[in-house]
Amino acid sequence: MISTSQMKHLIQSTCGWMGEKFASDDAVTLVLETGLVESGYKYIRQLGDGPARSFWQVEPATAVDNLAHYLKHRKELMGMCADASLVDLKNWQLYEEGLWGNILEKNIAAGIVHCRLKYWRVPKPVPNTLEGRAKYWKKYYNSEQGAGSEEKYIDIVREIL
């Protein structure tokens, strides 16, 4: 497994490039914990035959949704996301799931950016407790249909952090 302290530093740095408001302590912790729960920082492809990529198990369709329905209308933020991930701005203007599947699998910072954007688009503040973040992750990231549970989230985070 990757060093969690190094991963936290990378998440702080990447979110900081997106803008100070994206890099709150609670948000950085949520993104760090999401990677732990989604992949254990071991997998960059969804196990089985699923589409999810990166340590944060972001589906290419989710990345394209972030681009087409959010960043498209926020050009300055799009540029900051491109800078944060070291992915050419032209790719942030392409809504191609195949391309984003490759980027997410090969670029750790792109996974961080799309994970953070998915949470940013939630109209509720990031909780500041482990239990609150577990509930938030389940509802807004893993979804009601997802295989994860709040208990699993809490157990994994307590075991590793």
Image (cartoon, helix red, strand yellow):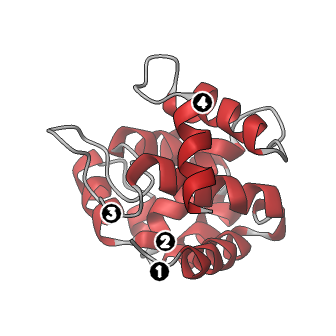
Whether tag 4 and tag 3 are in contact, CB under 8 A, the answer is no
Label 1 or label 3, whichever comes before in sequence order: 3
Whether tag 1 and tag 2 are in contact, CB under 8 A, the answer is yes
Query: Which quadrant of the rendered structure holds the N terminus?
Result: bottom left
Residue 84: image x %, image y %? 58, 76
Label 1 or label 2, whichever comes before in sequence order: 1
Distance from disc 1 to disc 3, alpha carbons, whole Å, reads 22 Å
Residue 37: image x %, image y %? 49, 48
Distance from disc 1 to disc 2, alpha carbons, whole Å, reads 8 Å
Label 4 or label 3, whichever comes before in sequence order: 3
- Of badges 1 and 4, the one in the foreground is 4
Given the image, on which type of amino acid does mark 3 rest?
Answer: Lys
Q: In terms of depth relative to the viewer, which is nearer, 146 or 99?
A: 146
Given the image, on which type of amino acid does mark 1 rest?
Answer: Leu
Given the image, on which type of amino acid does mark 4 rest?
Answer: Glu
Whether tag 2 and tag 3 are in contact, CB under 8 A, the answer is no
Label 1 or label 4, whichever comes before in sequence order: 1
- Check residue 86 in the rendering and tell me which mark sits there, or answer none: 1
- Number of dots carrying numbers: 4
Q: Residue at x 55, y 73 (%)?
A: 4
Element on which disc 3 rests:
loop
Label 1 packing within 10 angstroms: few (<14), some (14-19), many (20+) = few
Element on which disc 2 rests:
helix
Side of 19 where 57 appears, left or right = left
Judging by the rendered image, the residue that carries numbered circle 2 is 109
Tell me where residue 33 sits by quadrant.
bottom right
Q: Residue at x 49, y 42 (%)?
A: 68
Given the image, on which type of amino acid does mark 2 rest?
Answer: Ala
Element on which disc 1 rests:
loop
Judging by the rendered image, the residue that carries numbered circle 3 is 42
The answer to whether one can see residue 149 in this image is: yes
Side of 3 where 105 appears, left or right = left
